[in-house]
Amino acid sequence: MPDKHLSTQFDSQLNNVSMRVMELGGLVESQIRQAVYALSEFSVEVADQVIATESRVNMMEVDIDRELASIIGRRQPTAVDLRLLLAISKTTANLERVGDEAERIARMVKSIIADGMPRALPSSDLRTAIELASALLRKALDAFARLDAVSAVEILREDGQVDAEFDGFVRKLITYMMEDPRTISSSLDLLFIAKAIERIGDHAKNIAEFIIFIVKGADVLILLDWMLPGESGVTLARKWRSDPRTKSVPIIMLTAKVDENDKVKGLDAGADDYITKPFSVSEMLARIRAVLRRRAPEQAVPNVSVGELTLDGATYRVSYQGEPLKIGPTEFKLLSYLMHHAERVHTRSQLLDKVWGDHVFIEERTVDVHIKRLRESLGKAGVMVETVRGTGYRLTAQVTRTT
């Protein structure tokens, strides 16, 4: 955790919330172990225990979120303390999602058992992927406890091994279903289990990225209360806005003053946003992201080509066989992500997280609408965007053409 503060109470609060995160991590790891046991032994009883644990995981996430809101509201942290609290919030959310994946594995195990042919499935082929994903999560939690950026970087490098295992297993499972069509239903359940395992690895990678953010991140934003000892927050905001060193740093006022006139004064003093108490951590994070998006320069998208389809990130142009195509802004982002991760299958929830952002709350079927628009915009190249039944979408250059 960060260096000692003048307020020992603040140190105690930071240590307490960090310990709560580690406790949540331990509970989620236990969920994964039980889910793996339920899969290996095809145990309905253990699968039910995994599902029952999910409510505890959800409650712990809510409790940590409330504790974070209380700390931020009372302390108005800055610099590394603010980065730590924001990263804790995101880490907690990712751990809760890991719990969701463990629950999904348990439910799929029960479905396979209900179909009556568990022993015939190649579930043992998932052992390596499970071990890799579990190890990544364990390393991520250890790195979080020590704020070890070096270990976090190693986790980012190792995540590709889980992805490779998933891709290999999918190919094996497709062959298996083709050889014995009677197993298709149960095999699809096993495919969802494999996808859940891959997602556990993705969440471990996310936690590693948050650790790097805590340790290496720049101080890019100020959370400012109105009522401070000595000078008011409004006075400080005016000073910082007039100082060349801080005039470009975003400021968000976090205060109990709810009158419209007070809001106007705060914004006129130089605040980029104004949040009134009480507030939720989710709302505060969304507002921080919105302010940073407005302040940050637009980052160029790297150029990429897949087959005869080319995307130019600098000019926001797309062409197929040398002919330009007209692509809408959302479809452009969607195509860019698919092209930069070609030949891989992406679920709707993954596309929502990566293209729209994990702070946006929209229906997964929205992805289907934009995929349809993207195919229409691509014309002849639309066949490169494939639907993988029961899973999601993939962009491929290996298109089977009909004559």
Image: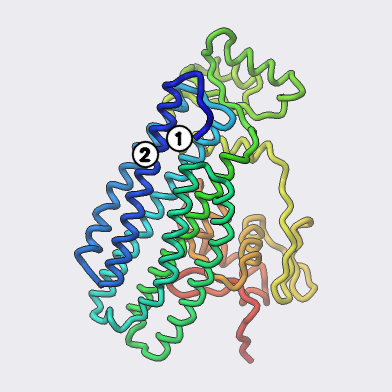
Say which quadrant the C terminus sits in: bottom right
Which residue is drawn at the image coordinates 62% and 70% (left, top)? 342
Camera-nearest label, 2 or 1: 2
Query: Which residue is tagged 1?
Result: 281
Q: Could you say which is closer to the camera, residue 344 or residue 5?
A: 5
Q: Is residue 70 visible?
A: no
Residue sitting at x 42%, y 21%: 9
Residues at marks 2 and 1 touching, judged by CB atoms closer than 8 Å:
no
Q: Residue at x 53, y 29 (%)?
A: 3
Which residue matches tag 2? 20
Q: What is the three-letter code of the residue carrying label 1?
A: Val
Query: Dot 1: what SS?
Result: helix
Report x, y in % for residue 199. Answer: 46, 61
Tell which circle, 2 or 1, labels the residue nearer the N-terminal end: 2
Closer-to-camera residue (337/17): 17
Count neighbours of disc 2 (C-alpha within 10 A) and say few if under 14, some if 14 to 19, many if 20 or more. Answer: some
Q: Residue at x 52, y 39 (%)?
A: 286
Judging from the image, the colouring scheme is rainbow
x%, y% of residue 45? Answer: 19, 64
Q: Is residue 135 above or below residue 402?
A: above
Determine the secondary structure under disc 2.
Answer: helix
CA separation in Å, label 2 and label 1:
16 Å
Residue 11 appears anywhere in the view = yes
**Is 70 placed left or right of 210 in the picture?**
left
Amino acid at dot 2: Arg
Q: 16 left or right of 77? A: left
Return the residue found at the far top: 230
Does residue 197 sit above or below 246 in this rendering? Answer: below
> On the picture, is 1 further left or further right than 66?
right
Relative image position of residue 67 (x, y in whole percent): 38, 32
Residue 227 locus on image (x, y percent): 52, 13
Classify 10 Å Cα crowding around label 1: few (below 14), some (14-19), many (20 and above).
many
